[in-house]
Image (spheres, rainbow, N blue to C red):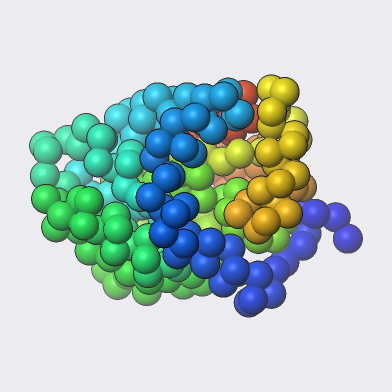
Amino acid sequence: MTGNALEPNADEVLAGAAVYSKRPILAAYDLWVLGFVCSRVWHCPNVHMRRLYDRNVDARHLDLGPGTGFFLDKARFPGGDPALVLLDLNADALRRTGARLARYRPQAYQRDVLKPLDLGAARFGSVGLNFLLHCMPGGMAHKAVVFDTVLPYVEPGGRIFGSTVLSHGVQHGKLAPKALESLNGDGVMNNADDSFEQLDAELAKRFPRYRLWAQGSVGLFEITVV
């Protein structure tokens, strides 16, 4: 069975999310991961992800796996007062992000993004999936189900965008291979089999209008929903 077809069990899903309950990881995430690691290990400075948000974010925005809220905190929302919804399997991450973005009065939901989201009649002009896929266990075909679960909540003309660290089909720097081996071994990442080609194939199955490109070890994508 190829890595693209693997499906995780429930324990693997919960383990991937539980990593972000550890206070040292959350406390150091902005400075260490989004600062040093993005630039020096993945060769993708966080300015690239910040531009993704500024180009695509709408006044009605849903963010899946918002992390510490770093990018949402800095995003330039149209009108400056967005209707913001945060969705994550990890309650600690939701609390931290919600507190950071309290000025926007975000709604937060604890959900598994590969299962029905149960958001009722809510509809959004943009959805962010930044650094989410590489944290999810399973092969790319399994991870890509997230696009199917979120699509019913995106208005025509809306945008789905995000980024993910990939193991294959991208240009790694010297530090990336060892970092990938270590992070996958520790369960912080689950992307040992993820490739640019697999992600491109999954997007092509679902969306007639999308852009996918690589910056260092990172794949970035922008999708226009038709």
Q: Is residue 94 above or below residue 76?
A: below
Q: Is residue 79 above or below residue 22?
A: above
Residue 136, percent across and down? Answer: 60, 58
Q: Is residue 174 above or below residue 96?
A: above
- Residue at 42% x, 45% y is 28
Q: Is residue 140 visible?
A: no
Residue 102, percent across and down? Answer: 15, 55
- Residue at 20% x, 37% y is 77
Q: Could you say which is closer to the camera, residue 128 or residue 184?
A: 184
Q: Is residue 193 above or below residue 163?
A: below
Number of numbered discs visible in the structure rendering: 0
Q: Is residue 46 left or right of residue 188?
A: left
Q: Is residue 138 visible?
A: yes
Residue 116, percent across and down? Answer: 46, 72
**Could you say which quadrant of the image residue 219 lies in?**
top right
Q: Could you say which is closer to the camera, residue 4 or residue 16?
A: 16
- Quadrant where the C terminus sits is top left
**Could you say which quadrant of the image residue 150 lies in?**
bottom left
Q: Is residue 92 left or right of residue 108?
A: right
Q: Residue furthest right?
A: 1
- Quadrant where the N terminus sits is bottom right
- Residue at 70% x, 68% y is 8
Residue 159, percent across and down? Answer: 38, 41
Q: Residue furthest bottom?
A: 10
- Residue at 53% x, 61% y is 19
